[in-house]
Amino acid sequence: MATRKVLVTVVGHVDHGKTSLLDKIRRTAVAAAEPGAITQAIGVSIIPLETIQKICGKLMDVFQGKLTVPGLLAIDTPGHAAFISLRKRGGSLADIAILVVDINEGLMPQTLESIDILKANKVPFIVAVNKIDLLPGWSYDPTKFLLDNMNALDYTLQGVFEGKMYDLVAKFAELGFQAERFDRLQDYTKQIALVPLSAKTGQGIPELLVVLTGLAQKYLEKQLQIDESGPCKGTILEVKEEKGLGTTLDCILYNGSLKVNDVIIIGDMEQPIVTKVRALLEPEQLAEMREKKSRFRNVKEVFAATGVKIAAPGMEKAIAGMPLRSCSGKPEDIEQLKQEVQQEVGEVLVENEEGVGVMIKADTIGGLEALKMLLQEKNIPVSSASLGEITKKDLSQLETLREKDEFHAVILAFNVPIHSEIQELAKNKHLKVIVHDVIYHTIEEYQEYVAQLKKEIELRELSSLVRPCKFFIMKGYVFRQNNPAVVGVEIEIGKIRTGDPVMKAEGKRLTIVKSLEENQEAVTIAEQGKQLAMSLDGVTVGRQINEGDFLYTDIPEDDFKKLKELKKYLTPREVEVLKEIMEIKRKENAVWGMG
């Protein structure tokens, strides 16, 4: 067994400095050591322990020479969404994460999403509080370490800086995390380290690397143990077309080794892809992988943990985020690995036509798993989870789902295209499709949609109920005594409709409202403050009703129970009348409206 390098990923909100931070670490590493001390592999920067020691200098004395971690492997895939694709069975590919936060902007939507995903995957993280150099009046001595520079700051600036740091501590506390500035931490297992730094000047980077290495050394030792010479385990980072090579895979290997001519098995939507490695390619020393003109060199074998480009036939349908395994090629080994990778994929893909839940789509298996995981955390069920763009078949399935459950009849899509034809079809059929390139926004919009839908349904239900209403018969406005009685009324509180039952103040039902007329025009509803003519069948003015009488809507018991549930939509005065009606009813039946 060997100890592999620590896989580190950098996450956070757009423009908070993720790429700048990695670039600065790379440049600092090269400046601190001889050329080649930092190697660029596919999708990762390999930073050996010796280079970290040179960058950090005396700060490493804290370890008293007992470091066993061989270095860091910084995963530097561009973009926020890429992190989500960094998967392996049972969680994230990253051992530890650096969450980059702009000290002036604080926690933004993508920061919160990154925290949710880290939490769901149980990935430990430290916070790089970036852009301290942009605080007005900030200055530093490049020959000194961070704490000495911070202590030398002017008193007022120290106050501003401390205020911003404690704002972050408070925000993390709201999210259920204990966080503290790295030099004040009491317990690394319970508290998150906040490291102030500048990705632009490099100030604070040695401290960040010391904290990172220390955490890995203390808490990740067991999971860094690998069989360096065994078959490889990895994850596809990107599928690319390379001139002269055809379709290639940029992969991260986190266990074992991979050789040219090894058989590889790759997870897929239906059947695993089985093929043979034709070539293994690594970038030239310090080449930037994201540049199109990067040059490669052929290698015969690679060892975990590393990044590598694989050229092999039959990989046109390969999908980013899928698991990859290698073996010598024995039929029984191939079969076992095919089952293993498909089981891993099957845990994410869902097709439950009988079940109720939202439909989810994503561009990668990792994105799909992250979306599914975050929905589960919020107790939102999933009826289907699939990869790729939204299709007519998805919309047809959504229609069927809507018949069962309006609240979950929604497609939530992360980072997938939606064609105008599909958009138009969904609109015409009044189907809800939510597409975002930030999972956090997708879920947030869904929750807002559900809240709005619930309100609409409740208001629809409310409109079918007999509402609380108190009104009186105006003196001098008897238009007809009976058959039907027509009287002038004033609605004191609430609203009444034609067909609503009416009772006297002592609780006796009189009749129903036959019709309403305002300014000699028929209306169906009369609201608070209105004066109008009301027609009442089966009563005679001077017998059952009199001028000046106060009357109420005679609310059925079931309607009363529902009105109690929908009380938030009633005005305070309607609630008072509802209470009056309840008290009238309970004189005759003590348990009326209960249960």
Image: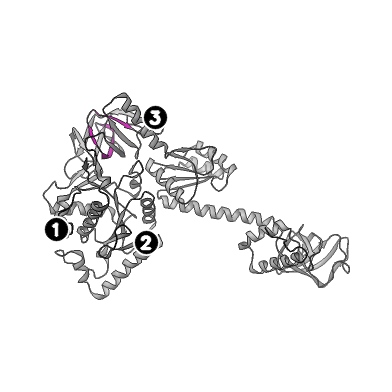
Task: Please check the rendered image and state whether residue 261 is part of the magenta-colored stretch, yes or no.
Answer: yes
Q: In the figure, residue 326 lies in which quadrant? A: top left
- Locate residue 77, reporting x and y percent: 29, 46
Among all residues in the image, which is located at the extreme top? 331
Vertical relation: 52 (above or below) 240? below
Q: Which residue is mark 1?
A: 57
Q: Secondary structure at mark 2?
A: helix
Q: How many marks?
A: 3
Distance CA(mark 1)–CA(mark 3): 52 Å
Question: What's the residue type where badge 3 is placed?
Answer: Gln
Vertical relation: 554 (above or below) 327? below
Q: Is residue 104 left or right of residue 488?
A: left
Q: Are marks 3 and 2 in contact (CB under 8 Å)?
A: no
Q: Secondary structure at mark 3?
A: loop
The dominant secondary structure in magenta is strand
Q: Is residue 107 left or right of residue 250?
A: right
Q: Find the magenta span and give its range.
A: 245-265
Asked whether residue 313 is in view, the answer is no
Q: Which residue is mark 2?
A: 172
Q: Which residue is mark 3?
A: 271
Distance CA(mark 1)–CA(mark 2): 31 Å
- Locate residue 68, reporting x and y percent: 19, 49
Pointer 1 or 3: first along the chain:
1
* Chosen colour scheme: one colour
Question: Residue at the spot x=46%, y=51% of the render?
Answer: 443
Question: Residue at the spot x=79%, y=65% of the render?
Answer: 507
> Mark on residue 402?
none
Observer-nearest of 182 and 139:
182
